[in-house]
Amino acid sequence: MAQRLCEHRANPVSLFQRSRRPRPLPRERLILDMRDTVVYAIGDVHGCYNELLALEQKILLDALQFRGRKIIIMLGDYIDRGPDSRRVIEHLIAPSPKGFLRVCLAGNHEVAMLNYLDGLLSREPWLRVGGRETLFSYGIDPDRLAELYGSSDDVDARIREVIPASHVGFMRTLPVMVSSERFVFVHAGIRPGIALETQDEADLLNIRSEFLSAANRLDHWVVHGHTIEDAPHPDGRRLGIDTGAFRTGRLTAVRIIGKYGRLLSSGD
């Protein structure tokens, strides 16, 4: 069972705590006290830096009307597909907007990139799901490298040299879930019927149909990305806010206060 360590106090960092698990996992799961707190969850960015900046400005303006603590929760998938993955990562590594705490969760695309960099996934599968655009943003053309170097291993070695260590370190330390008494914030979703503290990390990052088809059986409201929604709306007890920014130009957030939510979009 997760142990609640933080008290209801002003320091925003104390809002988050490690969830106690029966066995260690590579990524943290955080517990959030949402009392007197405004939460803005942002969907999959996928290299859309300009859309992220535009949405952040809307969030800053929207938040002026509220007192109390303010938190931005990023739902993962910051890289791949869109044109500016490097700038997105640099932005998220930098300090959060004034007056906000920002928590960035892991997405399956960050895990795929790390698997490639660690030699657990070959280059071509990652390139096919958007890794090519990510490498372009770092000034790397993998096809050109393949022409210049004599072996695939040499190409991979060169790519690993170019990706900044700070960016890799950022992706390695991303937590995988934030939960509160009422809400769960996660990249893909959760497996219905399984307690939060025993959810499999692979499900949190990748689940789709088993989660989407059981939205009416969830014990928490789940705010997630991963599955593109043309027009986000509550479905059972889930809200998906990935609006495919890399192809629509619309990056979406939801503002949550208490049990009420309001959508904001970079494209409004």
Image (spheres, helix red, strand yellow):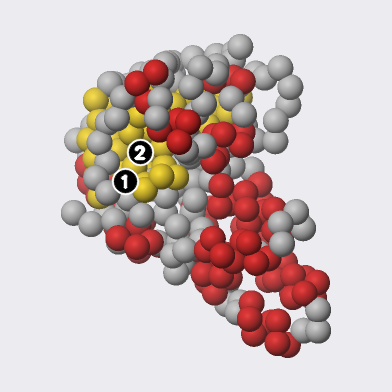
10 Å crowding of disc 1: few (<14), some (14-19), many (20+)? some
Give coordinates of residue 120: x percent, y percent: 75, 54
* Snapshot quadrant of residue 19: top right
Extreme residue in the bottom direction: 148
On the question of residue 53 being in view, the answer is no
- Say which residue appears at 55% left-offset and 40% top-offset: 205
Which of the 4 image quadrants contains residue 22?
Answer: top right
* SS type, badge 2: strand
Reply above or below: 22 against 267: above
Whether the residues at callouts 2 and 1 have beta carbons within 8 Å, the answer is yes
The residue drawn where x is 81% and y is 79% is 151
- List the residue tagged with mark 2: 240
Report the front residue among 116 and 6.
116
Asked whether, in this view, residue 30 is left or right of residue 254, the answer is right
Residue 130 sits above or below residue 192 on the image? below
Please provide percent x and percent y for residue 21.
67, 19
Task: Tell me where residue 36 appears, x and y as whole percent.
Answer: 32, 21
Disc 2 versus disc 1: distance between alpha carbons? 7 Å
Give 190 or 65, whichever is nearer the viewer: 190
**What numbered label is drawn on residue 229?**
1
Q: Amino acid at mark 1?
A: Glu
Say few, some or many: other residues with alpha carbon within 10 Å of mark 2 (under 14 / 14 to 19 / 20 or more): many
Task: Give the vertical position of 64 relative to 22 (above or below).
Answer: below
Residue for point 66% across, 47% down:
172
Left of 109 or right of it: where is 210? left
